[in-house]
């Protein structure tokens, strides 16, 4: 017996089941950046998303019982198409907000890479992590 159970009985609660939904290497044209030349032409951004989601107790091969990555991609595309964004950090926050709009998403890890900034570097960018409790 756990010594703590003598002092404080542990409730008999099943742990929450989670799953990870991911989107890897989504490359989109985006109007992003603080420099004048970045306002004149779109540049490629690569977006990676990892979502920790509550798992439905009975998925039953039904898309309504899971967090749909197609819905997340459509939301991300809408954010990118919504107009010029100055900072990569702002884009990452907006992508996280879209993902956390689904109440089943507990945590969102977002990575945004700008692919065409420096010829010497494959990419530059940011990674953020947002959770439902810390929104």
Image (cartoon, rainbow, N blue to C red):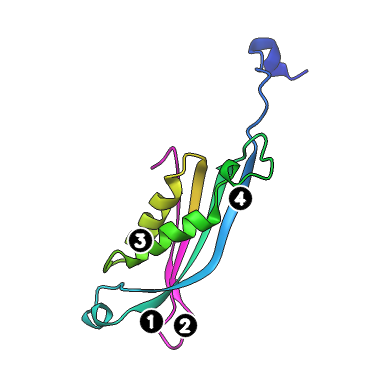
The residue labelled by disc 1 is 117
Which residue is nearer to you in this view: 45 or 102? Answer: 102
State which tag comes first along the sequence, 2 or 4: 4
The residue labelled by disc 4 is 20
**Residue 2's spot in the image, x, y percent?**
74, 20
State which tag comes first along the sequence, 3 or 1: 3
Mark 4: which secondary structure? strand
Q: How crowded is mark 3: few (under 14 residues within 10 Å), some or many (20 or more)?
A: some
Q: Residue at x 47, y 39 (%)?
A: 103
State which tag comes first along the sequence, 3 or 4: 4
Which residue is nearer to you in this view: 97 or 12? Answer: 97
State which tag comes first along the sequence, 2 or 3: 3
Residue reaching furthest bottom? Answer: 119
Whether residue 125 is in magenta: the answer is yes
State which tag comes first along the sequence, 1 or 4: 4
Q: Is residue 26 left or right of residue 85?
A: right
Q: Distance between the residues labelled 2 and 3?
A: 26 Å
Whether residue 121 is in magenta: the answer is yes
Q: In which quarter of the image is the N terminus?
A: top right
The residue labelled by disc 2 is 121
Mark 1: which secondary structure? loop
Mark 3: which secondary structure? helix
Check contact, mark 2 vs mark 1: CB within 8 A. yes
Q: Which residue is drawn at 47% across and 63% down?
A: 111
| Residue 26 to residue 17: above or below | below
Q: Residues within 10 Å of mark 1 (few under 14, many from 20)?
A: some
Q: How far apart are marks 3 and 1 (CA)?
A: 21 Å
Residue 54, numbered label: none
Q: Nearer the viewer, mark 2 or mark 4?
A: 4
State the extent of the magenta-drawn residues as a range: 110-135
Q: Which of marks 3 and 1 is in front?
A: 3
The residue labelled by disc 3 is 79
């Amino acid at each position: 017996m756990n010594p703590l159970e003598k002092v404080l009985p542990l409730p008999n609660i099943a742990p929450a089941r989670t799953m990870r939904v991911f989107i890897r290497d989504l490359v989109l044209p985006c109007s992003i950046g603080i420099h004048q030349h970045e306002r004149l032409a779109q540049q490629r951004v690569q977006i990676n998303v990892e979502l920790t989601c509550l798992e439905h107790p009975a998925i039953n091969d039904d898309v309504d019982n899971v967090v749909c990555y197609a819905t997340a991609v459509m939301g991300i595309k809408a954010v990118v198409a919504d107009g010029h964004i100055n900072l990569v950090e702002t884009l990452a926050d907006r992508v996280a907000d879209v993902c956390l709009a689904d109440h089943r998403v507990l945590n969102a890890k977002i990575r945004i890479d700008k692919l065409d900034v420096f010829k010497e570097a494959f990419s530059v960018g940011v990674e953020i992590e947002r959770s439902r409790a810390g929104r």
